[in-house]
Amino acid sequence: MNPRAGQTKKRTRIQAKNEAKILEAALDIFATFGFRGTTIDQIAQKAEMSKPNLLYYFRRKEDIYISVLERTLDEWLTPLTELDPDGDPIREIGKYTSLKLQMSQNDPTASRLFANEILHGAPMIEHVLKGSLKDLVDEKAAVIHHWVKSGKLTKVDPYHLIFMIWATTQHYADFKIQMRAILGDEVDQPDYFEKAGNTISTVFFDGIKPR
Amino acid sequence: MNPRAGQTKKRTRIQAKNEAKILEAALDIFATFGFRGTTIDQIAQKAEMSKPNLLYYFRRKEDIYISVLERTLDEWLTPLTELDPDGDPIREIGKYTSLKLQMSQNDPTASRLFANEILHGAPMIEHVLKGSLKDLVDEKAAVIHHWVKSGKLTKVDPYHLIFMIWATTQHYADFKIQMRAILGDEVDQPDYFEKAGNTISTVFFDGIKPR
DNA sequence: CGTTAATTTGACCAAATGGTCAGGATTTTA
DNA sequence: TAAAATCCTGACCATTTGGTCAAATTAACG
């Protein structure tokens, strides 16, 4: 009996170990080369197993890809769920922005994986975007809208504000190569993301117009 | 004699027409599927010619890709060159941001093409990033730095400010599918980008902290 | 220990794809 | 208009790659 998708038997030790190994390897490869740019052989090699053996755990390339995406999605959305309607707006948005930036620093592959998927038309996760993602964003946009209404924030469109936060923070994962080309090794220094965070919060909170 | 790269003979009418047709088709396909995700057949079909005929004009897939990239790069960098050191800082940065956003609206393929290339490690244009792009950015960062020094702008890091502008504006091209999943057809309405522009300039200029 | 189930592998297949080539069709030019 | 150059095509090839399979190996368990 093989352990492939859809079956309910209990998972073996070996199964758990190898599936984890595969998914870890696959995340890295998919994030760098995209779905079509990735070969099963590449993943197999990185996971230190033969291609047929890898295919014993995941019947098709697409299955690996979907698993990796799903696995990463939750983690990716968590910070937004923590935006607290009862907290101080500036503090909450600051926390959220900072958390997202940290994720770009610590786990850029996740960001790149989604960037790839979305750039290519989100063929695999469109339903998630239209489903749980939309729901979550709608909910949090309402929170921000409420903050604006009560005068605790400048009058801005909540959705576009969220998009701006995503854009700026994820840019530090997705476009790091461009940044490195311009700034050199500085981008790999520990204080680089600190400087980025300072600039982002300065601009987001106070704007570039001097008072 | 074939018209392939490296030769200096004058270009035929047919040559000019077909090369243009190929590059136009290729931009679209490459922007959507990336380099490896694109097949020569796809481009040939979109350009309404047979694969061998396409390969008569461009010997290799890579040649088409590089041509498309180079062709788009100049256009892509133009707005930044127009940042005027003698202009009013707020007005200049506003103009630049607005211009970039407009480009995301009118020619999202260009943005997606670069996003893809950079996500995949910029194998073809790393030298451009480290060359003319870096030079241009260094120059304009100095201009912004000067503005900050003279108190015409809030104290921000010029490079990170530029990155923020790129990130926010290009996001509207690269992640439009995600936006559409969340906001629906609204993103295709003519006033959508206007709203985006308003939010961006409000945040960039004045920040979200109410005064 | 021996039987059964799970795991691994080498060999293999079919489809997709980048690219070639000989020759025919068409356009240019002398 | 006829030779020369350019343009175009069908047929073809080699490689890559996703995926299969029968059989061998290893682990689990009564």
Image (cartoon, coloured by chain):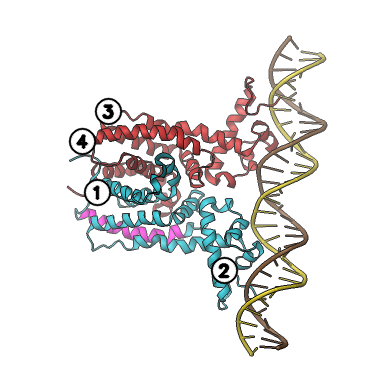
Chain colours: A red, B cyan, C yellow, D brown
The residue under label 2 is B18
The residue under label 1 is B205
Q: Residue at x 61, y 36 (%)?
A: A47
Task: Check if mark 1 and mark 2 are on a common chain.
Answer: yes
Amino acid at circle 4: Gly
N-term-proximal mark, 1 vs 2: 2
Residue A151: numbered disc: 4
Label 2: how many Cα within 10 Å (few below 14, some 14–19, many 20+): some
Residue A70: numbered disc: none
Q: Is residue B147 magenta?
A: yes
Amino acid at circle 2: Asn
Q: Which residues are magenta?
A: B128-149
CB-based contact (under 8 Å), mark 1 and mark 4: no
N-term-proximal mark, 4 vs 3: 3
The residue under label 3 is A87
What secondary structure is marked by label 4?
loop
